[in-house]
Image (cartoon, rainbow, N blue to C red):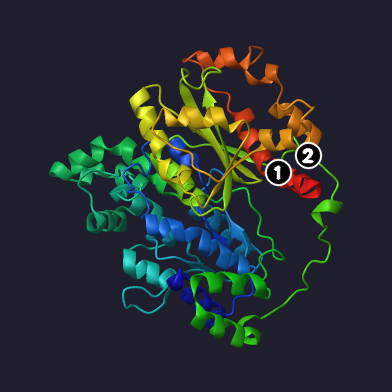
Amino acid sequence: MLGFTNTLLEVLEKEKPSHIAVVFDPVGPTFRHEMFKEYKAQRPPMPEDLRKSIPYIKSIIQGFNIPELDVEGFEADDVIGTLAKKAEKKGYTVYMMTPDKDYAQLVSENIFMYKPKRSGKEVEVWGIPEIKENFGVDHPDQIIDYLGLMGDSADNIPGCPGIGPKTAQKLIGLYKSIDGLYENTDQLKGKQKEKIVASEEQVRFSKELAKIALNAPIDFDEEKFKLIDFDEAKLRAVFKELEFFTIAERVFKNQADLFVSQTEKSTDSIPIEEKEMILRDVKSLNCKFFTLDNEQVRADLKAELCVQKEFAFRTVLSDSDPNTSKLRGMCFSFKSDKSFFVPFPENSEEAKKVAQEFKYIFEDEKIIKIGHDCKKDILALRWLGCEVKAPIFDTMIAHYLIQPELKHEFSFVANSVLNYNVIQEEEKGKGKKAQLSLMLDEEPVKHDQYCEEVVLGLELKSELEKQMELMA
């Protein structure tokens, strides 16, 4: 966190960008995982300390009023590539701040790699001459061929067996591209020729995996990305929590010199109590539902959950009795625009392993767990070795305390408190009762209604707390 903040400040102070944004990988799979299931499968999970620092880094970014971007289904590389090319077309000079060699394929007359200080090396800016010199290519476009031929062990891109960086550089230098290489295989000899010929399909596929997409669904918004003054209150709060006292002094002392332009802050915000309720059904719920079906993306979710003050959750069971039913999955939400479904394997031992990945989060007594009729969820998780420890906010119990004479099932509470119509029973299982559909192991869980419930759980807690305060 300290290193990130120092690097960010150095860029703001020395480079004085007119526009800036920070891009993150999304939680969940991307189009490359759909192309190749094993993509990045061998990459080790992010160290826990680093993972826990990400929410603080995001708080710092937000304090500087810098846009924080991620696009569902696209890696950060693709989002940056798309924005870089769009900004270039509008006449901007673009600097992509990264040490990643993959970005070399994007370099042009107006797009540069800005390699930050690391391992004692000073900042480096790479344009076309530097790409040619370091990779031995004639043009940055050839980097895609270079990466496709040698592969990338970090991303589990196979490439051609036995072809490393030096050989790939030599072959692309000679034949200019993968197409050129395969048009001239008669000039190759021995084992090298055998491997290259035998691996043609794999090499061409690897090139597609290595190619940064330039069609991410995002626009270069000049106003949105313009550098403006920071939010002093937010920055002071996060710096105080992290004990970044020296950095705080540096930032607030040099405030006038950090920014090349300032805009007026928005004055059209409306107090929550004055906003018209706009939630009506799932079509108007501005939220994305994600399925997290591998350990890496579940680790990303765990990292987010462990630093939250609260999150909503629920279990997905095969029948109504938590003591005898099979746990089919869990849903989580900690923000109003995202909800996550974690499916469980059919094998009970494997399901237990997945559940216990979240064990320490459920047992963290600093985090509020929000649910509706939590008793069944607590019992179901207990059978898999997970204790859900207080504090717990049960929206069903809260609603009972406020309106004991009314019904308390989730659909009724959501409708009466939030003016929201939940997904109806017939929509849950394509005409079947939801409980029956969940008992059919061969049928995948229709998880949208469960994702919907945990997102609404966050808002229900907020509204019910207000009502209980009025009663006190």
Marks 1 & 2, CB-CB < 8 Å contact: yes
Instruction: Mark 1 vs mark 2: give the one in front.
Output: 1
Q: As drawn, which residue projects farthest toward the left? A: 190
What kind of element bears circle 2? loop
In the image, residue 452 above or below residue 363: above
In the rendered structure, which amino acid carries the disc numbered 1?
Glu
200 to the left or right of 224:
left
Query: Which residue, given by chain and number where applicable, does mark 2 sit on?
Result: 279
- Closer to the chain start, of discs 1 and 2, is 2
Where is residue 290? Give x, y as percent.
55, 38
Where is residue 269? Give x, y as percent.
81, 60
The front one of 232 and 393 is 393
Q: As drawn, which residue projects farthest toward the front? A: 472
In the rendered structure, which amino acid carries the disc numbered 2?
Leu
In the image, residue 196 above or below residue 118: above
Q: Residues within 10 Å of mark 2 (few under 14, many from 20)?
A: some
What kind of element bears circle 1? helix
Where is residue 245? Give x, y as percent.
51, 80
Residue 230 visible to an observer of this rendering: no
Query: Which residue, given by chain and number where applicable, does mark 1 sit on?
Result: 459
Q: Marks 1/2: CA distance?
A: 11 Å
